[in-house]
Image: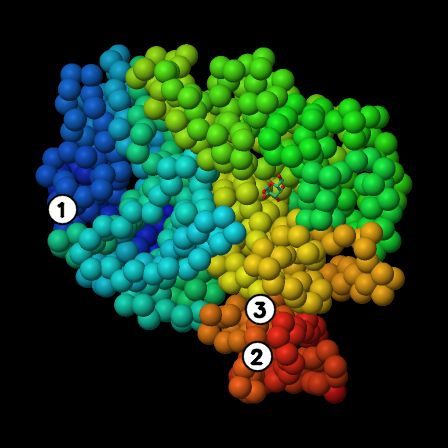
Amino acid sequence: MQIDYIAEKKLFVLATPNSTYAMAINGQGALGHVYWGKRVSRAADLFEPPPGFGGVSQQEYPGWGEYFFDEPALKIAFHDGTRDVRLRYASHDTVSHRESRELRILLKDSFYPLSVTLVYRLHPDCDVIDRHAVVTNEGADPMTIESVQSAAWYPPRDNTYRLSYQTGRWGKEYRPQEWTMGQGRAVLDTRRGTSGPDFTPFFWLDVNGKADEDNGQIWFGALHWSGNWKITIERNRDNQTRITGGVNDFDFSWVLRTRESFTTPVFSGAFTDAGFGAASRIWHDYQRAYLFRKEKANGLMPLIYNSWGTFQFDIDEKRMVQLAELAAGIGVELFVIDDGWFGRRINDKCSLGDWYPSPDRFPNGLNPLIDKVNSLGMDFGLWLEPEMVSPDSDLYRAHPDWVFRFQNRDCSQYRHQLVLNLARDDVKEFAFNTMHNLLRNHNIKYFKLDNNRYISEPGWACVDIPDQKSVWVKYYHNFYDIFERLTKAFPNVLFENCASGGGRVDFAMHRYFDRINRSDNQDPLDELFLHEGFTQANLPKLAGGGCHISKGMCGINGRSTPMRFQAHVGMLGSLAIGENLFQCNPAQLDELKGYAALYKEIRPVTHRGDFYRLISPREQPLAAFEYVSKDQNDAVLFVLGQSMQFRDVLPNIRLKGLRPETVYEVEGGKRMSGAGLMHIGIPVPLRGDFDSRVIRIRAVPEA
Ligand code: GLA
């Protein structure tokens, strides 16, 4: 990684291992974009600015003002009514952090006391550039921010790009979509108060739709923001494509008073010329090295038992103790009590907010169960939904003013619950103290944060009217502050991100949460498709659930599938069992024991290795995924059948990411070189619907 400034050309050049990013100060003194794409090492090649560079339309961080008509990065109303931002270069410096290096470019408005610092952060051995902006009012009069985006990205002009993105809803997250961009503007966003699931805060652009898993140039990015966000992808009349993203400006404004600053979330961008598979691996490595908490980055995910899949709200100490005994017997490492342990919670109509153990079902508190779980050699985990309150709860009766509500209006309920206004500091402290006390007073090693409705009618009566639209952002400032403090205080607790499944999956959440309830849909057939989408931007080991092996959420489509298929699909990520163990016969318990052992054996490779999507379930009656250890000595191949028809011959499975000259042994005895496995491949016979194989492949000394 390298950051250079070539003074005589007023040119900034950022170099990552495979890409170059360049910008320069133009004739008006504004900062214009020059180049982003495949590595160009000779700086002199960047001296000739591209067409459009001198005008306002190719600014690194375009303010809404002057003769500019596209999506702005910054829109401000000054105190005197002027709504026109003109940013000019003032100075720059570079800062070294422990691992990364940062370029900071200071821009100032040509008249008003407004400054913007653009920050570009590079990391060693990584093609990701992290960008954000800091907007400061350096004067005495307030100014109102109407839109403040994190960054604008410019892939090379004139190309026709295909935009790939993801859409979804509950139970159907991360579905791939694409749009071939003519002149026009596409907006991906959320107004629900959570980062998903309708869209995910990611984009991928390739030229003419030519890129595939292994080939082709891709410009791609991800926003680190868990609330309302917006990514605008536009191709203007001059064939310039621009991607602008950050906090959603819908129903947003922020009054910046004297000497105050607004820091945007990070918007990461990266380039590869090796297709969508490489783009995914760039994100996966980046997450492990620079996003996740250090304590958990390379950790192995425990085998989980979760009560929800079978028992839902029907849990009590006695039955959970019996269940824990059975779970320990099959090799479970973490025993989780989901919803239903607190207050009077026997269904979803009450008690959110009353976070004390149910006096009827856990009359002695949680500790007797936790002690039992620990004595069986397992860790204990707990579910909580601290951002919510049931109208039928002691908390709501005590603090009806803590929820979002507009004056003279009722607030809509969903799942019989209301949203607490976390932007209030008293609510934030309540949520923090609730979780802190639970963690401090119990031996809890896993904490499942849930969030089961969106934010609507976001009234915040007790602040001045001009400040009320800041609530969407202040909510998340407080949310991050809570988890910053909790993860510091309890570094060994595994924090799980759940929002009705994958309703809030983004890179900001990845900083605090080590596992994701990837979807409430744990039908293993659907999960083949979820895995393909999820892994585009997210490390596979994050892909959790509560009950991969169970009849509960597995049965979302009313389809029954073999336990073996459920287990193999669950092992693609972080495996959890939710089966009713009371109803399993000894043979079934033994079968589960076998899956537990297999999961533990392969997870060092599946969690720490490189990930390859070999065959898409959208193209064949099966899916194939492969994980390769970083030293390329071990691989695990998953071949997962859907429905077989016409006695069709199945494709040979061609592996990826092996050393061509090394000889490998495929489980079962067959030996082949890496080149043979990658180019000729191996047949993997599947019989019948939902048949599956997990095959280990190991480097062997050549015989
Ligand atoms: C949500 C979660 C589930 C489960 C239930 C409990 O639906 O996604 O995993 O925790 O809430 O009410």
Dot 1 falls on a residue whose secondary structure is loop
* Separation (CA) of disc 1 from disc 2: 59 Å
* Separation (CA) of disc 1 from disc 3: 48 Å
State whether residue 319 is above or below residue 594: above
Kind of residue at disc 2: Met
Kind of residue at disc 3: Phe
Residue tagged 1: 54
Residue tagged 3: 625
User: How far across and down, in percent of the image, does residue 493 sit?
Assistant: 70, 37
Q: Can residue 601 be seen in this snapshot?
A: no
Dot 3 falls on a residue whose secondary structure is strand
Kind of residue at disc 1: Gly
Return the mark for residue 671: none
Name the residue: 81% across, 55% down. 583
* Separation (CA) of disc 3 from disc 2: 19 Å
Return the mark for residue 644: 2
Taking depth in this image into account, of 649 and 144 the one nearest to the observer is: 649
| Between marks 1 and 3 in the image, the one whose residue lies nearer the viewer | 3
